[in-house]
Image: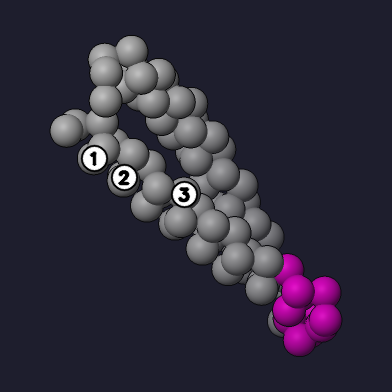
Amino acid sequence: MNAKRRKEITNCLESIADQLARLQELKDDERDYLDNVPENLQSSERYEKDDMLYYELEGAIESLENAVDELEEATKN
């Protein structure tokens, strides 16, 4: 890989890192929301859907982090 493409990938990774940080904040906000739902509503369909979406968001963030790690490794070589 030439230096120009390596630099472009590095710039993209920096942007992705910023977006990942924002996604982490949103995930944390969602966890706080879920943790503060009253017990009598925690068995509701809405809560269960929100809880499932939280775990999907968590998985998506993890996948993005893995992709970033792979790209960082690729630009080292």
Crowding at dot 2, Cα within 10 Å, few <14 / some 14-19 / many 20+, comes out as few
User: Residue 16 versus residue 2: which sits nearer the camera?
Assistant: 2
The residue shown at (76%, 74%) is 49
Report the magenta residues as a range. Answer: 40-50
Mark closer to the chain start, 1 or 3: 3
Q: Quadrant of residue 52?
A: bottom right
Which residue is farthest right?
Answer: 45
Secondary structure, mark 1, is helix
**Residue at the (36%, 19%) spot, across then down:** 5
Vertical order, 17 against 32 (above or below)? above
Quarter holding the N terminus is top left
The rendered magenta stretch, by its main secondary structure, is classed as: helix
Residue marked by disc 1: 73
The amino acid type, in three-letter code, at marker 3 is: Leu
The amino acid type, in three-letter code, at marker 1 is: Glu
Of circles 1 and 3, the one toward us is 1
Q: Is residue 67 left or right of residue 26?
A: left
Q: Which mark is residue 69?
A: 2
Q: Residue furthest top?
A: 4
Q: Amino acid at mark 2?
A: Asp
Residue holding disc 3: 64
Nearer to me, 73 or 62:
73
Question: Where does residue 64 sit, x and y in percent of width and height?
Answer: 46, 49
Pointers 1 and 2 in contact (C-beta within 8 Å): yes
State which quarter of the image contains the C terminus. top left
The crowding category of the residue bearing disc 3, from other C-alpha atoms within 10 Å (few below 14, some 14 to 19, many at least 20), is: some
Asked if residue 71 lies left or right of residue 25, the reply is left
Q: Is residue 47 magenta?
A: yes
Work out whether residue 14 can be spotted. no
For label 2, the SS is: helix
Please rate how many residues cluster around mark 1, counting C-alpha atoms within 10 Å: few if below 14, some from 14 to 19, many from 20.
few
The CA span between labels 1 and 3 is 14 Å
